[in-house]
Image (cartoon, rainbow, N blue to C red):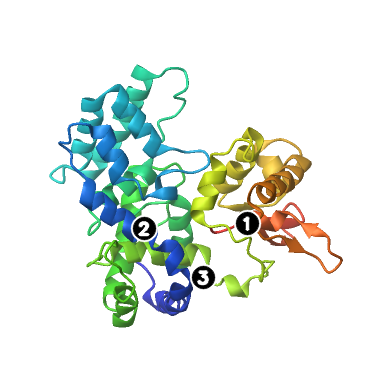
Amino acid sequence: MINFEKLKPVFEGYKDYFPSHWKDEKYKWQAVQQFQDHWNIDAENFGEMFKEATKKTLNLLASGYAYPRAMVIEFAEADDQETRHMFRVLFDESRDLLERVEQFKHKAEELRQKYDDGTWKNHYQNTNAISTYLWLRYPDKYYIYKYTEYRKVALELSEDYKPKHGGSAETMIGGFRMYDEINAAILDDTELVELHRNEYSDDCYNDPFMKTATIDVGFYLSRFYNKDNEDWFPKDYQPGLRTDDWLTLLQDTSVFTPKALQIVKRLKDNGGQATCTQLSNKYGESVNFYNHGSSSLARRIFEKTNCHIMETENKNIKWWPILYIGKKADDDIDGSYVWRLREE
């Protein structure tokens, strides 16, 4: 059960946030419409159909260290029929959801082991990816599950749901129930609904039950809500890089070297923020590995993109804000400064 009194100010904050961020989040509604227009489980070439249907998912099915979409395409090249069958079972609404999710993960591992050419170290079909497939196929019923977002939403709103790290199907389904409650409140808020309706273009899914809008509210709560009350800095600087820019950079090994990917992955796995000391204590390597490694990565990003940089009054360049926002660490936290990955 969520606390609806705490939800009210979240909605008010979201309404203020929405107009300036719609252009960055619109792709979610476009991704659903693309999938609805092109999904065909009986297509002659399943891999090509899947590739086209998921073409607009961008970072939803790809990140700097996980590539579930690309892996499905490779599975289909290796075994079209088995990959097709995986999705046929996953999308069979007559079957238990928990069973479907677990079977999908199990089958993905079977295919990985069977056709591994030495490069398939991971199938990447976790609950985040699987929930994304379910949402794309049934956008009036499902949500995207992401542990870090659901954890923050639960901490703010839920009185009983506490997501567990590890990506179990049970935790995902519990999160769906929490989002169902948020969704019901959204549908009762005429102003919030109209805010969305007025923005949808022809290439956007019309989201009649506001499920994708619910995902977006959860994203806002986890990333932006109460942000103005925190001492994060810099407040007035943006590198000017969008999501698709970051996706391109993440694929560029001259920018995101293995060590750079390691730093970003560890920070993301730690909830998206940490001190360099915390990362050193938890994952190993020296504090300077994370500190210098981040600055070097930021410099390479600038050299590749010529993005906006932050200069001090003395014209000294600060590189880290390209990647992070920061604040002084509390007394009970190991380290001097907490660094948080930028929302984009």
Label 2 – label 3 distance at C-alpha: 20 Å
Tag 1 near tag 3, CB within 8 Å: no
Q: Which residue is mark 1?
A: 340
Q: Residue at x 41, y 43 (%)?
A: 167
Q: Secondary structure at mark 3?
A: loop
Q: Which residue is mark 3?
A: 225
* Furthest residue in direction left, as rendered: 94
Q: Which mark is residue 28?
A: 2
Residue 31 falls left or right of residue 294:
left
Determine if residue 155 is in view.
no
Give the amino acid type for the residue marked by disc 3 in the picture. Tyr
Residue 236 versus residue 182: which sits nearer the camera?
236
On the image, which quarter does residue 139 sit in?
A: bottom left
Give the amino acid type for the residue marked by disc 2 in the picture. Lys
Label 2 – label 1 distance at C-alpha: 23 Å
Q: Residues within 10 Å of mark 1 (few under 14, many from 20)?
A: many
Sequence-first disc among 2 and 3: 2
Q: Residue at x 49, y 62 (%)?
A: 222
Sequence-first disc among 1 and 3: 3
Residue 89 falls left or right of residue 144:
left
